[in-house]
Image (spheres, helix red, strand yellow):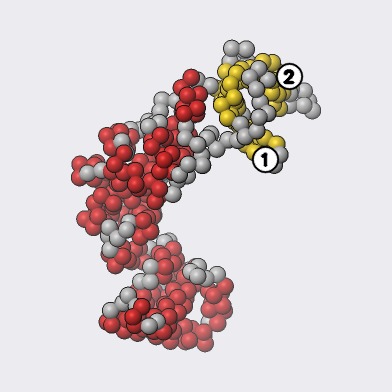
Amino acid sequence: MNDASALLEVTWESAKDAQQTDVGSTTFRILKVIKQAKDEFSVNDLITLPRYRPGEKTDRYLLFGNAAGTELDWQPPVAASQSLVEYLQNAPKPNLPYRERLPYFMGYLENSETPISDDAYGEFANAPYEEITPLSSKMPREKLREWLVDPKVSPSRLGLYGLMMGLSGNDEDRQLMEKKILEPNTDFRLGIDGVMGGYLLLAKEPGLEVLERTKLADKQAPFSETYAAMQALRFMWQYGNETISPKRLRKSMELLLTRPELADLVIADLARWKDWEVVPLLITKFEDPEFGIPSIRRAIVRFMIYCAKDAQEVKNQPASESKLTPEELAQVQALGQQAEEWLKKLEETDPGLIRDARRFLLIK
């Protein structure tokens, strides 16, 4: 709502019925100009929008206009309560930094008026994670606890609330989140990946062991739960700031190499994470009929290409710039050599597969 170019509080004035070739129209009278980019609207002006909408002259609405070239694209009218009008009037300007804007909207999460709570949630959903983390001390921890277990809260918001709890919670909150994650459930749970990510921020490696045991290694776990745990690993790799070590996250992701339905995605992640230690395992998997799916075979070939490439780059890097120990450097080069030799043999027997794998390299 706050990104609109024009925001008007209006009352219903009149409406023209729809005809066979005409959708009709509705005319509104402007009560208040809350926001406009140009001085084109004034109080008491009339504005007519396409589509017939019945109403009474006491009906009040908000009109949101988004810039579309030189014109305004008007959204469907929203019933205007005094609370909604005040919320929009007092909202920080969209051009302010997120860290100055988000504290205002935090106070309106799960507001009793749906348009307000939806808009406040949207501000957080659109904000980069790194802009949310500095607000951890201001987060409503007690309310977050309530929202995470309240069945009336939209499941689409649980991911955000789980991450916020992970940033602001304590050990008591960790236990609540663990209980939420371990609830017996065979249905798809929207947002549970965010709850798992927040849980890992709080629980660290012991929490990772819980997810390994119940979601990653347990083949009886529903696919959606396993995939959510996989998403949580990705989150921790990108945003966890080594709360859990990269090596430990790699080992957790490796558990999913036993799952053919996830293997191609897992292999791509392990390539991004430079987990070259699995080269021998992937060579074995390549010969396993259970993993003979074309997408998995291509993923393994790409993995070997990246491994060989990284080993060469590491070899050419000046020792003063390398972050690897001499032992790690030797291991990378040995695995890279193994990958390169395997690729050469495969190219002799299946050059088409090599060609297909090179066509869409996922890592630049």
| Quadrant of residue 172 within the rendered picture | top left
Q: Position of residue 344 (x, y in %)?
A: 48, 86
Q: Secondary structure at mark 2?
A: loop
- Hey, which residue is sitting farthest front in the picture? 39
* Amino acid found under the numbered disc labelled 2: Asp
Q: Position of residue 227 (x, y in %)?
A: 39, 54
Up/down of 251 relative to 284, above or below: above
Residue 263 in view, yes or no? no
Left or right for 277, reference 83:
left
Q: Position of residue 343 (x, y in %)?
A: 47, 83
Q: Secondary structure at mark 1?
A: strand
In the rendered structure, which disc, 2 or 1, sits on the residue that comes first in sequence?
2
**Distance of label 2 from label 1 (alpha carbons):** 27 Å
Residue at image location 41% in from the left, 70% down from the top: 271
Crowding at dot 1, Cα within 10 Å, few <14 / some 14-19 / many 20+, comes out as: few
* Amino acid found under the numbered disc labelled 1: Ala
Up/down of 321 relative to 256, above or below: below
Q: Nearer the viewer, residue 217 or 96?
A: 96
Q: Which residue is disc 1 drawn over?
A: 68
Crowding at dot 2, Cα within 10 Å, few <14 / some 14-19 / many 20+, comes out as: few
Q: Nearer the viewer, residue 171 or 221?
A: 171
Circle number at residue 314: none
Circle number at residue 17: 2
Residue 332 in view, yes or no? yes
Up/down of 97 relative to 279, above or below: above
Q: Nearer the viewer, residue 94 or 336?
A: 94
| Quadrant of residue 307 within the rendered picture | bottom left
| Quadrant of residue 250 within the rendered picture | bottom left
Residue at image location 67% in from the left, 35% down from the top: 72
